Amino acid sequence: MPKNRLFTTSRDLRSALSLLQEKGLSIGFVPTMGALHAGHLSLIDRALSENDWVVISIFVNPTQFNNQEDLAQYPRTLDSDLLLIGSRNNCIIFHPEIAEVYPQNQFFVPIDLKGIDAVMEGKFRPGHFKGVVHVVHNFFQIIKANRAYFGQKDFQQLAIIRKMVAHFNFSTEIVSCETLRESSGLAMSSRNMRLNSSDIEAALIIYKTLLFVKENKLKMNPQSLKTSATDFFKSGDLQLEYLEIVDEKTLTNAEDWQSTNVCCIAAYCNKVRLIDNIVL
Ligand code: PAF
C-alpha cells in the first residue's frame, strides 16, 4: 500500500476519506496554496502528530486574488512540494482543478463577517476574504476533517475562519500554529521565493518594527505607538501599506491596551507583498 496518496477529484478524495473515517481514523487538514516551505511542513508535522491521516490541499485559489499579476506571479512548485511531502507518511495530497473546488451548480451565500473582513487585508485586498471563506468552506465540506491547521502569520484569516466555522457549524476544530521565522526573524512565506538577498535584508524592517512595538507597549498609548512605529518602519526601504495595532478579536483599532493586542503590518518589498504580525 502506498504511504502517501494524491487525488485530483473531490469525488475520489471523498470516497477514500469515507473509508478511513468509517474505520474511526482521524483526519487532519492543512490547506495550502503550494510552494511549501518549513512553515507549512511544521503545520503538516503537527497535524500528523495529532491525526491518523493528513490531507494537504495544494491549490492556488483564484477567487482570493484581487490582483491578477499577483495571481500569475504566485509560485507554483508542485514537484518540489511533492518531494517535501514524500519524506512523510500518511499524507493525502489534494491537487484539484478549479472546477473540482467550485462546482458549477453550487449555491454559496457569502456570510456576514461583521466587519472583521473590512479592515487591514480586507481593506487593501477587496474580495480577498470572500474568496478565502468560499474555498475553505468547500474544502471543509469535502474533507470533513477532525482538525484543520492554520498559521498565525495570517492572523486576520484565522479570525475569519473561526467565524466561518461557527456560522456553518462545522465540527472541524481549528488549530492555530505559531509563525515560523528564518533565523533573521523574517516570517516564512511562499512569497519570500521572489525576494533576492538585498530584498530579504530590506524586508527585515517588518520584524524589527514588530519588535519595536512589543518593546514599547505600555510606554505610550496605542495611537502614539502606531505613529512612532510607522516612523520607525519608514527608516527602512519598504513601502508600507498598513501598520495597525488592534484588538485581537474585533480587529478594530486598539483605543487602550488590553491583555492581548496584535500589531499587523503589510508592506511591499519591490513588487512582493509581505504581511506579518506580533501578539503584544
Ligand atoms: O493561507 C493560505 O495559504 C490560503 O489563504 C488558504 C487558507 C490555503 C486558502 O486558499
Image: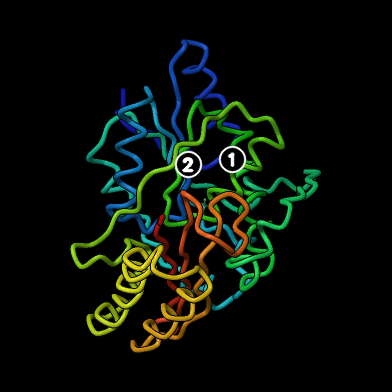
* Residue 8 numbered tag: none
On-image quarter of the N terminus: top left
Pointer 1 and pointer 2: residues touching (CB < 8 Å)?
yes
Left/right placement of residue 168 relative to residue 59 reads: right
Q: Residue 17: x percent and y percent? A: 51, 24
In this view, 206 is above or below 89: below
Q: Residue 156: x percent and y percent? A: 55, 56
The residue nearer to you, when weighing 238 against 8, is: 238
Amino acid type of the residue that numbered disc 2 sits on in the rendered structure? Phe
Alpha carbon separation for disc pair 1 and 2: 10 Å
Residue farthest top in this picture: 23
Q: Residue 265: x percent and y percent? A: 46, 70
Amino acid type of the residue that numbered disc 1 sits on in the rendered structure? Phe
Left/right placement of residue 46 relative to residue 147 reads: left
Residue located 44% across and 68% down the image: 275
Q: Which residue is mark 2?
A: 94
Marks counted in the figure total 2
Q: Residue 54: x percent and y percent? A: 40, 32
* Residue 139 numbered tag: 1
Few, some or many residues within 10 Å of mark 1 (<14, 14–19, 20+): some
Q: Is mark 1 within 8 Å of ligand 1?
A: yes
The residue nearer to you, when weighing 100 against 52, is: 52
Q: Is mark 2 within 8 Å of ligand 1?
A: no
Q: Earlier in the sequence, mark 1 or mark 2?
A: 2
Write down the quadrant of residue 4 in the picture.
top left
1 or 2: mark nearer the eye = 1
The residue nearer to you, when weighing 211 against 45, is: 211
Write down the quadrant of residue 47 in the picture.
top left
Residue farthest left in this picture: 183
Q: Secondary structure at mark 1?
A: helix
